[in-house]
Image (tube, rainbow, N blue to C red):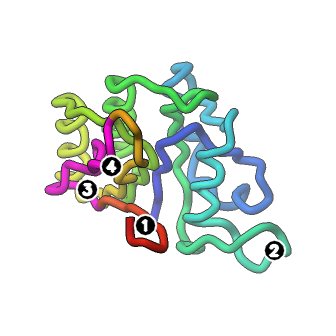
Amino acid sequence: IIIAILDTGVDMLHPDLDEKIHSSGYDFVNDDSDATDDEGHGTHVAGIAAAETHNDEGIAGVAWNCKILPVKVLDSLGLGEIGKLADAIIWAADNGADVMNLSLGIPIESLVLENAIKYAYDKDVVIVAAAGNYDPIWGSDVWYPAAYDDYCLAVAATDYNDE
């Protein structure tokens, strides 16, 4: 199983991940083949997904028998472009992703993004996306792409008050 991590990239030399990398992936921020993480979030997500077990390092990933396909769509500030995200989703679907993790979101609909998500879904890719975080301007509605509930599994967390 290949899990595409669409995020800030992945530290492919991390001792919990170096044996888990399917390929060097692609960097849609800088338009090159070096999807190395320069922020840390994507590496963290990749570790939760598939970190090596029994190596006396960090953690064990929940899908420890899977490989990671790094796809950099967010810069060091966690910012990206919808068009590049859509291109990255299509690229990941065409380059072996069985599962796609998008721990990111936007508060508005985008036809370009929806079409890319539908493309991946139609290629039998399981798409897992963050439901979003509370924002004083946008509230706590489910963000996109997670809100495309015909195609995505939305993941959220609550506090002790179930809020």
Q: Which residue is mark 3?
A: 152
Q: Which residue is mark 4?
A: 140
Residue type (three-letter) at the residue carrying disc 3: Cys
Front-lying residue, 163 or 91:
163
| Mark toward the start of the polypeptide (4 vs 3) | 4
| Mark toward the start of the polypeptide (2 vs 3) | 2
Image quarter of residue 45: bottom right
How far across and down, in percent of the image, does residue 136 sit? Answer: 40, 38
Query: What residue sits 18% from the left and 45% below the top?
Result: 118
The label nearer to you, 1 versus 2, is: 1
| Residue 105 counted in the magenta span | no
* Callouts 2 and 3 close, C-beta under 8 Å: no
The residues colored magenta run 138-153
How far across and down, in percent of the image, does residue 81 sit? Answer: 40, 23
Front-lying residue, 104 or 70:
104
Q: Which residue is mark 2?
A: 55
Separation (CA) of disc 2 from disc 3: 33 Å
The label nearer to you, 2 versus 3, is: 3
Residue type (three-letter) at the residue carrying disc 2: Asn
